[in-house]
Image (cartoon, helix red, strand yellow):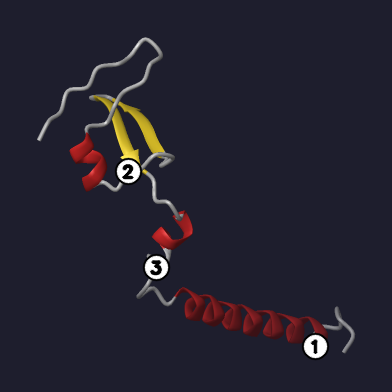
């Protein structure tokens, strides 16, 4: 549902009570203002941004993937070091 608000002389805009309640915007809440091609977009920011992002990557086995990639990299490094030792480049 569209709403119309009036900008005061100080540049203030009052967000209608219904929207504040629905979006849980309270006094002191932060909002993000983004200028886009179609105008101004106002997005409420979470009170606790860390809590808002918690669980966002759930289902992504990032740690396991990083550990596996590091194991593969270590194996390649060891193989290369062995080749260099065999060639007399590294002591060994």
Q: Which residue is drawn at the image coordinates 55% and 80% (left, top)?
A: 67
Residue 19: image x %, image y %?
21, 39
Residue 91 vertical placement versus 20 (above, below): below
Tag 1's secondary structure? helix
Which class describes the residues within 10 Å of circle 1: few (<14), some (14-19), or many (20+)? few
Residue 52: image x %, image y %?
40, 59
User: How many marks on residues?
Assistant: 3
Which class describes the residues within 10 Å of circle 2: few (<14), some (14-19), or many (20+)? some
Q: Nearer the viewer, mark 1 or mark 3?
A: 3
Alpha-carbon span between mark 1 and mark 3 = 44 Å
Alpha-carbon span between mark 3 and mark 2 = 26 Å
Q: Nearer the viewer, residue 40 or 20?
A: 20
Residue 89: image x %, image y %?
85, 78
Q: Nearer the viewer, mark 3 or mark 2?
A: 2
Locate residue 47 relative to residue 17 in the image: left or right. Answer: right
Label disc, if present, on residue 86 of the rendered structure: 1
Which quarter of the figure has residue 2?
top left
Residue 1: image x %, image y %?
9, 35
Q: Earlier in the sequence, mark 1 or mark 3?
A: 3
Q: Mark 3 = which residue?
A: 57
């Amino acid at each position: 549902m569209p709403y119309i608000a009036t900008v005061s002389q100080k540049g203030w805009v009052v967000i209608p009570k219904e929207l504040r309640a629905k979006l849980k915007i309270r006094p002191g809440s932060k909002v993000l203002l983004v200028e886009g091609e179609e105008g101004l977009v106002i997005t409420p920011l979470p009170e606790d941004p860390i809590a808002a992002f918690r669980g966002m990557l759930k289902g992504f086995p990032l740690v396991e993937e990083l550990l596996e990639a590091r194991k593969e990299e270590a194996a390649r490094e060891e193989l290369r070091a062995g080749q260099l030792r065999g060639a007399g480049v590294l002591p060994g």
